[in-house]
Amino acid sequence: MLERKLRDSNHIKIFDTTLRDGDQSPRPEGFKPQQFTFQDKVDIAAMLKKLGVDTIETGFPSSSPANFEAVSEIARIVHGPTIACLSGAVLADIDTSWRAIEPAKDIGGARLHIVLGTSPTHMYYKLEMTEDEVIAAIAKSVKRAREYTDDVEFSPEDASRSDFEFMMRAILTAVDNGATTINIPDTVGYAMPWEYGPRLGEAKRRVDNYIGKDQVVISAHCHDDLGLATANTLAAVYAGIRQVEVTINGIGERAGNTPLEEVVQAIHYRPDIYQANGRPLFTIINPNYLKETSQLVETRSGLVVQRNKAHVGANAFAHTSGYHQQGIVKHRETYEWMDPKTVGQESSFAISAQSGRAGMDSRARQLGFDTSDVEVSKGIRTKVKNYADETERAVTDTELEKIIADFKGETLINRFVLGEVEMHEVDHTSRSKITIFIDGKPHEVEEKGNGLIDAAVHAIKNATGLNIDIANYAGMSLEEGSNAKSGCTLTVKNEIKITSYAEDESVPLAAIKAYIAAVNTIDRSEQRKRCQ
């Protein structure tokens, strides 16, 4: 009998495959690079360690020398999480994979992950192998991997479309030859939760009966082709599996993978549902870093997180309706039973024609204005609604500041004024040269960054000494033709979040103008608060 590690049976292990399956997401046309760079992978792996994932799947080392190099570096420098990599059921690939992750064996653990298709579609059309040939390849490859490490994972690819009895034959063959984790993937997002959960639950029952209870970890890996990746993964957790394979922001092949943040937060917030042995199930993820990790992956991948994405989207804790805003002002849990701070987010109000006085007054106070006078508050609300109707969009904080200042007869003075802006790409590196006037004095700064906007923000931060970051932004073309304009709405984060909007001939230029406007609003709001 192989020696197997025991663990807390209520611990749901987080196997993050952002750097492998997530890296297989096609990037937007024209985005450079089309895959994570060496530095991207190293930086994201370090962030995943900070987040608290149990296992980082770093890539497919045999696919390219660059992939091999990145996997090797992560295995060498990221201490703590288990470092895994994927390999096909080919002995040469397994040998290459082990050379890549071997440095991690004594500093957190090194796992070889073997995959081979078991559905009729995969066996007959892709692999051109018979069932017996597939079983023989599984035995041979898992045995080879076990020669290198006692941490071997096997995945019967396309498991949800596999014949269940043949899938179990493949799984038990892998267990016989030393696999310590069995991952049962819904590779093409085909399954329904009431199919997938029971399938994995029954697989766990049979493996436990075969080798001993909890001696082999059963894992779920789901794709989102039908929009059910999270539902299927949670159904598997409910059925008793104890590892989930996920990605940050749900990036991955086609429609993507199960988002880490959704599964982790569901388990955390619903201990009444996810429990066993009289105790809640748990992960060791630190949710305070979810938003930061999401933004890093978004920036490096070029895959923009949808605004209404659960937990990490810009709208996840944003409120527009006047009734909702009033409820939040009086008692946050009326519409936010989850605390946004636990995921590194904040509540926010979108000021629009639908907003009421409670939301507008709350936002005005954050900008340093006193709107306690009922008549003043009513007058500002009327002007805001008229402005929102006229522009046909939400009112940004910089616009709200101007509306209030005009109503109260105050003059807004910009301490920071944008001068000339030069933006260009040199040898695949983004550079921005900015002239900015601070209290009337010109400062010229040039910086590089991960994109033209990032480079420009670095330059402005360097010139002003202010560490104000862009939390999110959305740009769009407003017209067609050679003289077309672009618009950009962005949010910056200091002690409070400030939204701003600007237009110019390109999205990067509009973004820089919006950024400067937001910085000036922050500067003035701080001055108002100091004078109160």
Image (spheres, grey):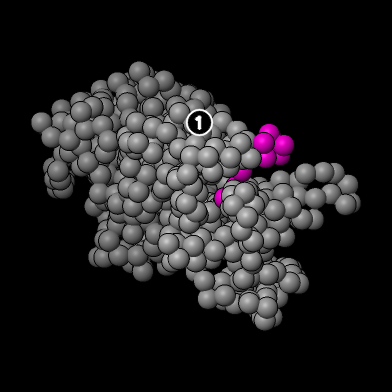
Q: Residues within 10 Å of mark 1 (few under 14, many from 20)?
A: some
In the rendered image, the quadrant that contains the C terminus is: bottom left
Please name whichever residue, 329 or 370, is drawn nearer the observer in this view of the structure.
370
The answer to whether 311 is drawn above or below residue 67 in the figure is above
Name which quarter of the figure residue 524 lies in. Answer: bottom right
Q: Residue at coordinates 64% horizontally, 52% vertically from top-left?
A: 406
**Label 1 element class:** loop
Q: Is residue 154 left or right of residue 216?
A: right
Q: Is residue 231 left or right of residue 404?
A: left
Callout 1 amino acid: Ser
Q: Residue at coordinates 18% horizontally, 31% vertically from top-left?
A: 275
Q: Is residue 74 left or right of residue 226?
A: left
Most prominent secondary structure in the magenta stretch? helix
Q: Position of residue 295 (x, y in %)?
A: 49, 53
Which range is magenta?
Answer: 386-398
Q: Is residue 172 left or right of residue 395?
A: left
Residue under label 1, please give it. Answer: 321
Q: Residue at coordinates 38% horizontally, 39% vertically from top-left?
A: 329
Is 391 covered by the magenta stretch? yes
Q: Residue at coordinates 32% horizontally, 47% vertically from top-left?
A: 342
- Residue extending furthest toward the top: 194
Please name whichever residue, 432 or 239, is drawn nearer the observer in this view of the structure.
432
In the rendered image, the quadrant that contains the N terminus is: top left
Q: Position of residue 422 (x, y in %)?
A: 75, 71
Is 390 covered by the magenta stretch? yes
Q: For residue 218, say whether it is visible.
A: no
Q: Position of residue 127 (x, y in %)?
A: 51, 34
Q: Position of residue 120 (x, y in %)?
A: 48, 24
Q: For residue 361, say whether it is visible.
A: yes
